[in-house]
Image (tube, helix red, strand yellow):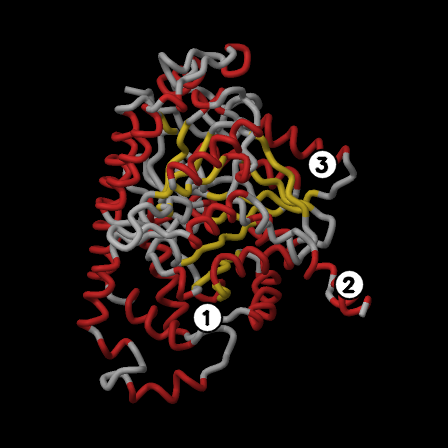
Amino acid sequence: MGLFSDKQNLLSKIAINEGHGENSPYFDGWKAYDSNPFHPTKNPGGVIQMGLAENQLCFDLITEWIKEHPEASICTNEGADEFKDIAIFQDYHGLPAFRNAIAKFMGIVRGNKVTFDPNNIVMSGGATGAAETISFCLADPGDAFLVPSPYYPAFDRDIRWRTGVQLVPVTCESSNCFTLSLTALEAAYKKAQEAGIKVKGLFINNPSNPLGTILDRKTLTGIVRFINEKNIHLVCDEIYAATVFSQPDFISISEILEEEVECNRNLVHILYSLSKDMGLPGFRVGIIYSYNKQVILCARKMSSFGLVSTQTQHLIASLLSDDGFVERFITESAKRLAFRHKTLTGGLSLIGISSLKSNAGLFFWMDLRRLLKEPTEEAEMKLWRIIINEVKLNVSPGSSFHCSEPGWFRVCFANMDDKTMEVALQRIRQFVLQDKAVEVPVKKQKWKNNLRLSFSSLKCEDTMMTPRVMTPNSPLPHSPLVRAV
């Protein structure tokens, strides 16, 4: 009996370890929603899901296209003639039409400033599979990637869990608007070396999840020079490339490589997906685009464990080959994201809740530091539990994103309809204005400013207003905080 009751004797170390991260507040918020989901009539007191970065704002456009093009599916009378050929196709290179359509779409999303080679595309079961596959290709167990923080909580699962690869945070702080600096990169790299950790690469998310900011040209150029100097890989997760809804425009790492920047292209790899830009996470379309032929060959072998179904490939190829639809979708998606972002952040600013200035993604970085009784992770978790259990909103605490400062929360805004958003906004207003949410002064030496007057530091204001020359100690991108109204 003892043998059967001891899971450690029955299961693998991977099966029983906590590396997946499901015990974090990020996933706990999802569980709270799943157990008590909001519904406007059936369960109006339920939890509203604002912790899921899902893009539901343009489903009507895709639905309309599908109705107008039944031949795109092999499961309709119009498309049934292709059923056999699609159903028996097993080549892990992917359907040629699919790879061509993806390569073309990636170029359109990036303003047609660069061209992507379909032969450099490797399929994967979603961005999760793509991140794990590239980790297997580039690093051995015990090796590490540098990752600017705050960063997407599931990177701990995607990159680390089954590979044994480590993540070394590159700390970014609100005192310089969470900008990534060369100083921080060098410090993280040096810290890893001193700890005897072999750094194999830098993993960046651009546009950023959870910040909703993009990296500017100087930042990206500095990053390329950094990885080239250290002779380490650069993995750019550009899964939110088409969610940029206002200026400045998105700049892909691929565009930087087209410029006169000294770089070994074999070190550069891009991750992409249709989960966010097209709002199709259930299709599990993940992409690795590498400039390294050896990585392509290795990743293609590994893709056998997570291919995209040929039925999905066939439909996606048809959808993305319609130039008129793609143009309309990208344009309309940006308009709807901009409007939703402005509506929600503007509503919060009216009650003194500010957020990091952002122009991309399906979320924003909300600043609730003034509601903490003390600037600690424990105080942040206490506030988060009140928001989950009493306010009934699933927003994700900054600590789950490895944020170095307590009091920041990620708020997703594109996964609900307008009426649900209005309910969520009303709940936040009521919470902030009630007695239990009394603003608490924050120690000046910790936050460097009086949050009642402004949510921006002088350094941040100066960074925003004054052009600067890049130096080793300069912040890289500019992402100023929004002032509270």
Q: Are marks 3 and 1 in contact (CB under 8 Å)?
A: no
Cα distance, mark 1 to mark 2? 37 Å
User: Who is closer to the viewer here, 415 or 183?
Assistant: 415
Disc 1 residue type (three-letter) = Val
Q: Which residue is under mark 2?
A: 6
Write down the quadrant of residue 1 in the picture. Answer: bottom right
* Dot 3 alpha-carbon crowd within 10 angstroms: few under 14, some 14 to 19, many 20 or more: many
User: Who is closer to the viewer here, 20 or 168?
Assistant: 20
Residue drawn at 38 percent across, 59 percent down: 274
Q: Which residue is under mark 3?
A: 192
x, y percent for residue 98: 38, 70
Q: Is residue 304 above or below residue 436?
A: below
- Residue 426 in sight: yes
Cα distance, mark 3 to mark 1? 36 Å
Q: Which residue is under mark 1?
A: 308
242 on left or right of 59 = right
Cα distance, mark 3 to mark 2? 36 Å
Disc 3 residue type (three-letter) = Ala
Tell me which numbered mark, 3 or 1, is placed earlier along the sequence.
Answer: 3
Q: Are marks 1 and 2 in contact (CB under 8 Å)?
A: no
Q: What kind of element bears circle 1?
A: loop
Q: Is residue 38 above or below residue 355?
A: below
Q: Is residue 320 above or below residue 47?
A: below
Residue drawn at 54 percent across, 35 percent down: 399
